[in-house]
Image (tube, helix red, strand yellow):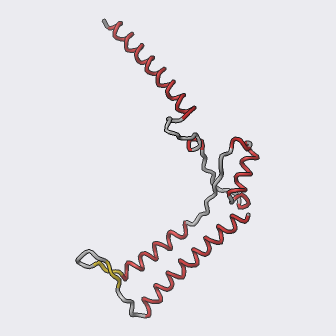
Amino acid sequence: FTYAFTAAAIYLATREARHYLRLRREYLRRGDGAGESPQPRCSVLVERVPPRLRSDAALHQYFAALFGHRDVHSAVSFVDCAHLEKLLDARDAAADAYAWRSEEGGYGYATITSDEGLSDLAAILSEKEQAVQKCQESIREAKEA
């Protein structure tokens, strides 16, 4: 009885493994059948891109020359604006410092009457505007390159 049970278990496990491999190969070749293209499964993230390749066209041209035009679907470059996140957090913190929450659940803003409060808020907003301008310049330079 033990030999028969073991043989049946091995047979079923082998049959299931073959079926899984067939389905896996089919999925990798064609996708899940929901109209999904193979592009998302074949995309790569490249970091530390040289400044001369930091535009979509230049990056696409580089990879097309490297791998062939048929093999490169598209290339998208992203400008790093992480420094904006810190400034936006500081702006939100300054706005929250002057905001109040009423008992009814509504929000309101207090009037800033001190010169110190006005200068703090002006400094934060000025830094934010400078960072946005810097990011916009980076994007323009990347597009022109």
Image position of 100 (left or right of 51): left
Q: Which residue is drawn at 74% across and 42% down?
A: 68
Snapshot quadrant of residue 2 = top left
In-image side of 134 versus 144 (left or right): left
Locate residue 39, reporting x and y percent: 59, 43
Q: Residue at x 52, y 32 (%)?
A: 27
Residue 50 coordinates in the image, percent (x, y): 71, 58
Relative depth, front residue between 24 and 93: 24
Q: Position of residue 86 (x, y in %)?
A: 50, 71
The single residue placed furthest to the right in the displayed view is 65
In percent of width and height, residue 46 lies at: 63, 51
In the shown orientation, is residue 137 left or right of residue 92?
A: right
At x 61%, y 70%, the residue is 135
Q: Quadrant of the N terminus?
A: top left
Q: Which residue lies furthest to the front in this view?
A: 35
What residue lies at 54% left-to-right and 82% top-to-bottom?
Answer: 126
Q: Say how many tags the image has.
A: 0
Rendered view: 106 above or below 45: below
Q: Quadrant of the C terminus?
A: bottom right
Asked if residue 11 is positioned above or below residue 132 in the image, the reply reads above
100 relative to 142 in the view: left or right: left
Q: Report the front residue among 36 and 116.
A: 36
